[in-house]
Image: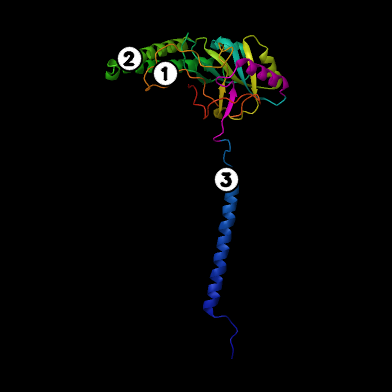
Amino acid sequence: MTDDAAPPGRSRSAALTWLALGCALVVLVVAVAHRRDRPVGDRTVGEVTRVGVADGAPVPPYLRAAGDELARLDAPDGYALVAFAAYLAPDRVAAVLAGVPVSAVLARVPLPDRQTEIVRIAARRLPEDVTGAMAAVADRKDREAADYRARAIAPAATADPELRRGYDDGAAVASREAAGYRAGCACVYAAVVRGAPDTLRALAGRPGVRVVDPAPEVVRLDRTVFTPPLPEQRDVARPPTDTGPVPGSGMGDSSEAAPTVSGPSPAGRPPVAGSGPPTPTPTS
């Protein structure tokens, strides 16, 4: 008699095969669900926005372009770069920007014929945030001056009079910067604000405001570098003339142009030179 039933070994093999396929399907479904729930990565990482005037570019065309863009602006609330006509003390900054939300200010101690470090200070409360950050910068400048003085008496400097003069000069400049910031100096020359077009246009007409450069393309301040013209820059945006000796390469740069942040603002302006993210606040 013929037995039509499948052999026990074959039935067990088929069952195991279907069980394995079922497990694989479950794993696949779970993996797809987990991937769908996973937050999307930040596509802005590595992208840097630059707002301001390019190093070496003429200032008057930049001011006109910023004014024209502000007049046409119809975007919702957005960021803008405000350049002042003169260096302002913290309380004066608060008066000029009264009623306008502020995110940061840019400052430097304006010593004659010297490049002094540009610092970007996070500031939402004026003038308290600015004065507090200035005190912190003053402490750092004191340490910088002490470091210069220590290098000036090191064997390498004592054997090289020119190198020693550079270190002594660096210590003197850092000490003057520390004294200025500690006294709440008139050192702020620009601010980053946020507002509606009408608010920004009204701000542009206030005394002490040189230009308001709207930057609706800015999404993340930590991926943006602002390069406003300094108050003394009337023709071309270039670092101040520095007549002092150059100290050794062991110290950090002092008073370079503000860190540059892609896409000039307003559209159609020359691209701003430089690359890379801005440094933490406050910083050079």
Asked whether 73 or 78 is in front, the reply is 73
Mark 1 to mark 2: distance in Å?
A: 21 Å
Judge from the rendering whether residue 144 lies leftward or rightward of residue 229; answer left or right.
left
Badges 3 and 2: C-beta atoms under 8 Å apart? Answer: no
- Residue drawn at x 64%, y 20% as measured from the top left: 213
Task: Identify residue for label 1.
Answer: 140
Position in image of residue 226 (x %, y %): 57, 22
User: In the image, residue 258 lies at what x, y percent?
Assistant: 52, 21
Query: Which marked residue is nearer to the observer: mark 3 or mark 1?
Result: 1
Asked whether residue 198 is in view, the answer is yes
Task: Say which element carries label 1.
Answer: helix
Q: Is residue 269 above or below residue 168?
A: below
Query: Where does the magenta region start and end?
Result: 45-73
Residue 98 showing in the rendered view: no
Q: Nearer the viewer, mark 3 or mark 2?
A: 2
Instruction: Of the two numbered discs 1 and 2 on the same chain, state the one appearing first in sequence.
Output: 1
Placement of 277 over or under 182, stated as above or below: below
| Distance in Å between CA atoms under marks 3 and 2 | 58 Å
Q: Amino acid at mark 2?
A: Arg
Return the x and y of residue 274 as percentages of the image width and height: 53, 27
Label 1 Cα crowd, 10 Å radius (few <14 / some 14-19 / many 20+): some
- Among the two numbered marks 3 and 1 on one chain, the one whose residue lies closer to the N terminus: 3
Question: Which mark is on residue 38?
Answer: 3
Kind of element beneath mark 2: helix
**Which of these two is toward me, 114 or 73?**
114
Q: Residue at x 57, y 45 (%)?
A: 38
Label 3 amino acid? Answer: Arg
Which residue does the numbered mark 2 point to in the structure image?
164
How many residues crowd mark 2 within 10 Å: few (<14), some (14–19), many (20+)?
Answer: many
Corner quadrant of residue 168: top left
